[in-house]
Structures are given as structure tokens and as C-alpha cells.
């Protein structure tokens, strides 16, 4: 069996994210801590070290996955900040894979996994070579740089032209399933179902692409109990830049997530913030005091550590 390559990734994080990391890794810390480090912890195949300077270092087979998760958290907590993430031994960002980019592709991506409030949304889209000029005119390659207002403006144009299939996992359903599956397993199950739906309708695509969140063998291991599994997937990190069907899926997922968050905000007369920072805890406390702690099962991912903090603060 081929040995997996160990990666080292450095991410500069803000004080808010440092606090989130300290809380998350509290029970996973190693006894010994390197000089100038706040902690060193184990996360599956990754060793995570957070330094007093705000530098977070991820080392291991899955370092890229864990670093990307905390990079997304940093973006959620500080949407206007430029993310500074460096990969050891990587001189420049990977060039665009022309074979994938200029092909007929089905690609999938998800939104909501780092947000305490709101559902998880997974979308698969089908983009042909002929669609590329249209999509490039909308400048959709990096949805993370688009504001919610821009997403709300361009997505209706996309969905009129680009075929897609979306799955939304409500908070109530998520809280049931997370007792059996971890987050990445749930994502794999949702991606698999969305891709199967699209490949039934469009069986002759050149590539099937997933924005990679787990190693290939780990992804398929998550699906070992599934009766029908989509094979021949091309897994690409930062796939939005490499594949327009993934970029479309990311934007459509985010569009639906925004709409769902708006519905929940109107239903409970309280704007629900994105992410999992301190503002989320403040809003959670208000909602628990008004509606009772059961409300969290309907609007939040209760396995996040925010839940215990909100319940504790709500009692005071």
C-alpha cells in the first residue's frame, strides 16, 4: 500500500479564531507544549500547534483538510480579512487544470458545515464547455470572495441556465444523524446522493469532481454502507478555481443557505449570524431564554461546543 504523504500547512489566525481553537482542542491537547505555543493537540491524522503569535501549524496526512476547516472558520469570523495560509514546499498556487476546466463536468460542493446555525446544503451541477464563457462573464470562480448581495444577484442567472441538484440537511435531521456519523461522513453521504442524481441525467460528463474534504479512500470508506456509490470521482482541493461546475455548486449552495437562514431569522424574529463565534453564543442565549433550550435542536448543530456555552450562559 502506498504511504500517504505528510503535509505541513501554516495558517495565520485572529484572536477570535485562537479562542475557538483553544476551546475545540481543549480535550485533545498533548501534555508537552513546544516553546511559545499555547497548545499542541492531536486531531485524527493531524498534529495541530497553536502559537502565541497566532500562527497555527497543521502537520499530518490530513493537514490540508483540517487547515481548510479552520481557514473557513477564520473567514466566517473575519469576512473582510485576507486569509494567509502557506503550504510547506509549495512555491506557487497550483495552475489551472485545463483538462478539467475546459471539459463537460459534474461537480459538487457544500455550505454550512462550519456554521452553528442553519442547515448543511450540498449541490451538484452540470457545466458544459459551451457554458464556460457565460459563467466566466459572471466571475464565479471564487465564491468565497463574493458578498451575500452578489450571490443573491447572480445565482438566479446561473440556475436558469445550469442544471443542478441540491440536498438540504435540516438542523433537526443533522442532530439525529450526527449521533451516528461524523461531519465528513455526513458530507460524503450528501455529496454521493447529489452526484448520483446528476449522473443519472447527464451520464456522459467528462469528469465528476468533488471539492476534496477527505482523502479518496476515506471518502469511499464513509460510503461503505451505501447501496449505490458514485465512482470515478476526481478529488481536487480548492476545486472552485479548477472546475466551474464546482464553482456553480458552491454558489448555489450558498444562495440556498442564505435563503434558509433568512427564513429562520424571520420565524424567530432574530438575525442568526454565520460562523460559530461569540456573537453566535449571544444570539443563542437570547433564543434559549425566549423559546427554551429545545429551540437549539431546530435551528443549530447541537454537537458544536457553542451549545454547552449557550445553555450555561442562559441559566445566569
Image: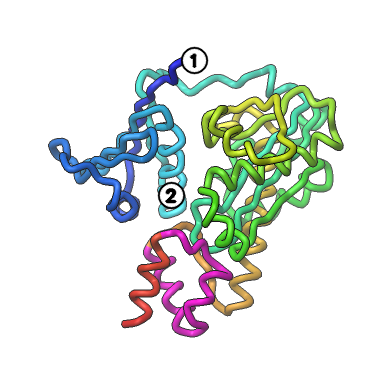
Residue 213 vertical position relative to residue 269 in the rendered view, above or below: above
Q: Give the SS element for disc 2.
A: helix
Q: Mark 2 to mark 1: distance in Å?
A: 34 Å
Q: What is the span of residues highlighted in magenta in the rendered image?
A: 278-304
Nearest the viewer among 33 and 102 is: 33
At x 44%, y 83%, the residue is 289
Residue 150 visible in this rendered orientation of the protein: no
Nearest the viewer among 247 and 30 is: 30
At x 53%, y 36%, the residue is 213
Residue 56 included in the magenta stretch of the image: no
Residue 299 included in the magenta stretch of the image: yes
Q: Is residue 254 left or right of residue 180?
A: right
Residue 139 sits in quarter? top right
Please name the residue that numbered disc 2 is placed on: 73
Any mark on residue 1, and which?
1
Q: Is residue 168 left or right of residue 133?
A: left
Amino acid at each position: 500500500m502506498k504511504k500517504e504523504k505528510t503535509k505541513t500547512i501554516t495558517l495565520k489566525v485572529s484572536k477570535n479564531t485562537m479562542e475557538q481553537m483553544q476551546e475545540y482542542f481543549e480535550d485533545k491537547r498533548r501534555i508537552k507544549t513546544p516553546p511559545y505555543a499555547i497548545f499542541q493537540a492531536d486531531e485524527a491524522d493531524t498534529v495541530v500547534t497553536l502559537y502565541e503569535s497566532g500562527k497555527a501549524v497543521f502537520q499530518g496526512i490530513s493537514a490540508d483538510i483540517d487547515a481548510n476547516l479552520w481557514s473557513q472558520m477564520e473567514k466566517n469570523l473575519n469576512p473582510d480579512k485576507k486569509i494567509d495560509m502557506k503550504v510547506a514546499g509549495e512555491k506557487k498556487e497550483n495552475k489551472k487544470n485545463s483538462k478539467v476546466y475546459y471539459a463537460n463536468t459534474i461537480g459538487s460542493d457544500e455550505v454550512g458545515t462550519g456554521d452553528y446555525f442553519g442547515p448543511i446544503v450540498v449541490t451538484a451541477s452540470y457545466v458544459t464547455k459551451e457554458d464556460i464563457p457565460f459563467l466566466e462573464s459572471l466571475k464565479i470562480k471564487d465564491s468565497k470572495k463574493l458578498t451575500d448581495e452578489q450571490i443573491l444577484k447572480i445565482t438566479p442567472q446561473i440556475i436558469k441556465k445550469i442544471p443542478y441538484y441540491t440536498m438540504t440537511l435540516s438542523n433537526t435531521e443533522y442532530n439525529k444523524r450526527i449521533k451516528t456519523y461524523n461531519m465528513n461522513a455526513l458530507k460524503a453521504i450528501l455529496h454521493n446522493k447529489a452526484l448520483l442524481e446528476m449522473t443519472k441525467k447527464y451520464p456522459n460528463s467528462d469528469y465528476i469532481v468533488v471539492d476534496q474534504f477527505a482523502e479518496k479512500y476515506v471518502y469511499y470508506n464513509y460510503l461503505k454502507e451505501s447501496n449505490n456509490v458514485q465512482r470515478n470521482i476526481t478529488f481536487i482541493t480548492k476545486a472552485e478555481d479548477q472546475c466551474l461546475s464546482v464553482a456553480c455548486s458552491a454558489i448555489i449552495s450558498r444562495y440556498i443557505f442564505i435563503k434558509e437562514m433568512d427564513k429562520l431569522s424571520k420565524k424567530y424574529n432574530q438575525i442568526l449570524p454565520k460562523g460559530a463565534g461569540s456573537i453566535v453564543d449571544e444570539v443563542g442565549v437570547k433564543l434559549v431564554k425566549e423559546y427554551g433550550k429545545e429551540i437549539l435542536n431546530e435551528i443549530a448543530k447541537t454537537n458544536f461546543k457553542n451549545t454547552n456555552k449557550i445553555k450555561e450562559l442562559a441559566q445566569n
